[in-house]
Each structure stands twice: as C-alpha cells, then as structure tokens.
Amino acid sequence: MTQAPVHRVQRTHRPSRFGFLFFLIIVLGLLLLAAVSLIAWHQWRYSDKIYPGISVAGMPVGGLTVEEASSAIHDALTPYPGPDVTVRFGDRSWVLSSETLGVSVDAGATAAQAFRVGREGLAATASASVADLLAGLKEDTLAQWEAFWDGVNLQPVLQRDDDLLDITLRRIAGEVDLKPLEGTLSIVGLEVSGTPGRMGRSVDVETTHDALATAVRRGLGGSVNLVVQEHRPAVMDVETALTKARAVLGHSFIIVAETSDDPQRFSADAAKVRQWLTLTPVSGPGGVVDLDVTLDHDQVRAFVAGIAEQLDRTPYDATLDWDATAGKVIVLKASQAGQKVDVEAGVAALEAALAAPVSVDGGGSPVPQEIRLPVATVSPTIDSDRVGEMGIVELVSEGTTSFKGSPAERVHNIVNAASKFQHVVVPPGEEFSFNRNVGDVSAANGFEDALVIAGDRTAVGIGGGVCQVSTTAFRAAFWGGFPITERWAHGYVVSWYGQPGMDASIFTPNVDFRFRNDTGHFLLIKAAVNKAKATITFYIYGTKGDRTVEMSGPLLSNVKDPPPPLYQEDSTLAKGQIKQVDWAKEGMDAVVTRTIRYGDGKVQEEKIVSRYRPWQAVFLYGPGTSVPGQTEANP
C-alpha cells in the first residue's frame, strides 16, 4: 500500500500580545526604576539642604544648608525691613521702625522652616504603616515639585525684644508724661494770689505695649493710639477761696468795750485780720480737695483775750471786823467791784461780722465796722454795800484753849497763825478751810522751829504750835453746831489740848480742818491771843439760829500702856548727861458725842472718834553714860 505523502505547511512567525505586554512592563519598570533612582538621588542630593525653588522674603535659599541659609537670612534681613508703626497722641505722632519696635528676624527658626518644606509628609508618618509612608512620600514629592516648578516664598519668622520696646515707649512717655499741678493760694501782706490746679497725665506703658505687639504680629504696619491716663491734682479750683480771702481782707473793725467807765475802743485793721486767716483743705467726693479760707478761731480768741487782759479787773472783798463795844459788824475797807470781758461773745461777734459783706461808704470805699464787746460787772463776794444783808449780827460760838507753859518759839507760831484769822468771812453754804487761811507753814511765812509730831517721834520742826490754833478753831465750830467736813486727831494725846478727843491736827497742805457754813447767813471769824493768860480764842459771828449744842464724853476705851522708855546715845551730850526729849503717853480711843437740838424739836447726835497711839518716853545720853537696862556702859 502506498502511503500518501505528508505535506508540511510552513507558517510565518508573528509577535504575540504577551510579548508586547511583557516588553511594556519591562520598559515601564525601567522608567519607574529610573524615576525612583532619580527621586532617591534627589533626596540624597538634598538630604541636608533646602530644596530648590524655596525663598525667604524673595531671597532664594534652595540648595543651602540650614546653617548657610540662617547666615544668609541674617545678613539680608538685619535690620528687619518691616513696615513702620505710627504711635499717635492728640496731634503728635511717633513713627517707629521695626528696629525701634524691638522686631528682628529669627534667622535660625526661618532657615529651619524653609528646610521643613517638602519634608513634613514623611516626618508626620515616620512610625505609621506602609500606606501612610507612601502617602507621606507622595505629599513631600509633590511639595518638592511645586517648589521646583512654581517656587515657594516664605515669610521670615520674627522675634520681639520686649525690653527694647519698653525702652522706646518710656522714651515717648518722657515726652508725654506731665505731673499734676496742685492749686495754690498765697497771702503775702494783704495781697492774695492763686494758681489753679492742672491735670496730669502718664503713658500706660503696659497697655500700649500690648497694642503695639498686636500690630507687629499682623505685620501690616498702621497706627496705634498711645494709651494715656489722666491724673487729677488734689487741689484743682482755688477761685472760690481766692474770692473769699479777698473779701475777708476788706474788713476792718472798731471794737467798743462797754465798760462801767467810759467805753474803751480798740481797732483791728486788715493787717490784723490777715493774722486770723488760715487755708484749710476740704475733702469732697471722689477724693477732690478744695481750698477754703477759714478763720483761725484760736487767733481770733487770742485777740479778744488780749483786750480782756487790759480790761478785766478782779473784784476786791470788803474787810470786815466786829465792834465789841457797838455789838455790830463794821467795814474796815470797802469792797470794789470788778469787771470781766465776755471773750466768747466777742469772738462770736467778730466771726459773724467777718462772714458778712464788707461795709462801704457812699463812694464804695470800705469803712471800719463797729463791734460791741460785752463787759460784765463782777460783784465782790463780800460787798460792803450789802453788809446789812449778810446777817452778821451776833456771836454764834467761841472756843478757847490754853498754851500755858509753851516755849517762846511755840508762842510765836501761835500768835503768827492766829493773825491769819482776823477778818475771815465765810459765805452761806461755803466751806471754811484752816489751811487755805493760814497759808504755807514755813519760815518764809513767818513761822519758827518748835516741837512737832514727826512720824513716831516728837521732833523740832517748822510751825510747832499751829495745831493749837487749829484745835481752837475746831472747838469754836464744834460749839456752833457746824457740820465738820474734815478733822484729824493727833498721833498721841497732847497735854496742851486738855481732855482727849477735842483736838484737831493739821499738816499743810494735805491734812486740813474744815467745816461748812449751814446757817444761811455770812460768818465772820476772828482769833484773839491773850499772851498774859496764855490763851487763844476763836470767835464766830453771824446769826445764831435756833439750835443749841451739848457735849458728852470723852468716853475712853482700849487704853494701852506706853512702851518702855527708849534711850539713845547722843554724841553732842557729855558723859553722864541724860536728856528727856519725849514723854510717855497712854494710847486710847476717845469718843466725844455732840448733840445738836433745834427749835422744831429735831435732835442730831454725832460721835467724834479719836484714836491715839501709846507713846514712849525718849531719853538721850552722852557717850559712856550708864542708863537703865544696861549691864555695861557704852565706851
């Protein structure tokens, strides 16, 4: 069998779609690789430099490192050529450049800002996912392309020197600040002048600083109003005080003192009135102080008191005595009335006149104004013109004591003290004071040294014997039934005064004897000394009234023996000489009862209590003298 021949068909070769796609992928891959390589090269090329196309304030900084850019920016923008800011106050203005505003470029921060352009995408996604990294890479690449293609112009980062700005503001404040001027008023001689107050002002540096800082941040320049605070002086208006002062200085016065004699005249001209004026600050609402012209009351009063010193006259009492022969009171020396200026009324009249309008004559010229100064008559307490009304018509009571055996110096003091009680008059209701009448018991007042009670001893002292007089006065007051307001017993029983309980000790000025005149009439008191009989008597004349006085006692109690004698050595005595200087007295309490009987049947009983200490005898002896109680004589 014959095998048919096989025919082979030869086909033409054609590229397949797969090959083309593969080829395309290869090409794209190469292109991508080239792009990535280019990007990688670009990133490597500018890893420490600013990307191209970036500028600061129009100055290219692409391709520079941060340090290079910082240096270039500093050199180009120092001082910073920013817009000026104008500061205004009223019609004044100050143009402040960026330099005077304390504004400068922070070159380092600006360079760092330029370096961050094109790098912020990856910087924000450094620790994120792959997708975020790709997105950040894309963002940075686009930013770099935009900078390269279109360019990026950055504004510089500015910084502000607050201290320099404050210095600028304080310089301006030095031109604007104005201290407030206090209003003043002055009186020189009779001329009055015044200066009104003036408002002050000061720049509020802190608030203006904040406003300027805001304008600088905007970077647009413009103007800012200076913030100024006003300050009011404490005294602003002086016109009112000025007018008042001039009005007061227009016054002059004639002061007429209406005395019992011819009227006395005194003048006060404008110069004198000037001395009475004083400027007084007066506080008002809001701390405002106004000046007021006021009168210095003390100065006005001193002026009137000066007139009073010339016119005042002390009244003099009449000197009275009792004429035993005629049995009536007589006037030895007539009284004299006094006068006294009413100072306060005079001050009030002057101040009222000063507040009134100035008196003027027909031609409009000021004339002195007449002021009446009241002067009152001061009657004497013992008026010789009214003796008949005093009621001194009889002997009311008397008291007598004996000073027999007293040494000469004691008698002298008794007589001297008694002489102080010759014409003593006690008005109704008034109090008799022994000390007030006897005066100072001193050598200057005529008293001599004599024995007195001094502490716990009888010693020599000024005025020994005066208590004899006060004791006698007490007894006269006792028998007159007068209320005894002060009376002191002696420290021990004194033999001069007789029975205990009827003595009265005094020691000027603190220990006194007093009684009150309750008769409703005047009393005349006289003391009389009879040296021959060694007696002193007090007489009280007046109106006796309807009372009688009785005495009982003294009732003695609590009697105590005196202490043993006391012996003291005295170098002035000779050996064997002993001298007694104090005598023993028993101590005791003595009660004297005074009974006063009145015509209406009323009976008043009073107990007068005296407490006396026991008193020891005291002996002085010469050195070497044997004395009782000693076993051996002193050497």
Image: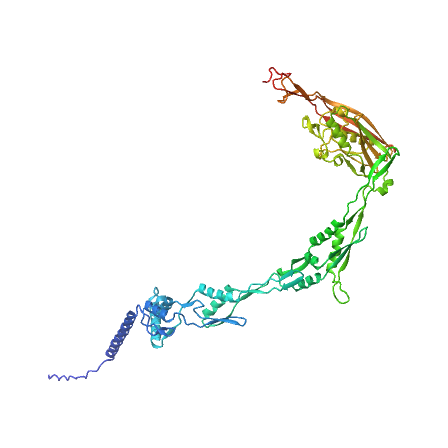
| Residue 364 or residue 292, whichever sits in front | 364
Q: Is residue 374 left or right of residue 393?
A: left
| Residue 198 or residue 605, whichever sits in front | 198
**What quarter of the picture does the N terminus occupy?**
bottom left
Percent position of residue 220, x then y? 46, 73
Percent position of residue 498, x then y? 77, 24
User: In the picture, residue 123 is in which quadrant?
Assistant: bottom left
Q: Does residue 564 appear in this view?
A: no
From this viewpoint, which residue is outermost toward the right? 326
Q: Is residue 74 left or right of residue 536?
A: left
Q: Is residue 224 left or right of residue 366?
A: left
Q: Is residue 418 above or below residue 232?
A: above
Q: Residue at x 75, y 32 (%)?
A: 416
Q: Is residue 553 above or below residue 25?
A: above
**What quarter of the picture does the C terminus occupy?**
top right
Percent position of residue 396, x then y? 85, 33
Q: How is the image coloured?
A: rainbow
From this viewpoint, which residue is outermost toward the top? 631
Q: Does residue 495 appear in this view?
A: yes
Q: Is residue 440 above or below residue 213?
A: above
User: In the picture, residue 28 is in which quadrant?
Assistant: bottom left
Percent position of residue 415, x then y? 77, 30
| Residue 186 or residue 40, whichever sits in front | 186
From this viewpoint, which residue is outermost toward the left? 1
| Residue 159 or residue 491, whichever sits in front | 491
Q: How many marks?
A: 0
Q: Residue at x 56, y 63 (%)?
A: 179
Q: Is residue 627 above or below residue 310?
A: above
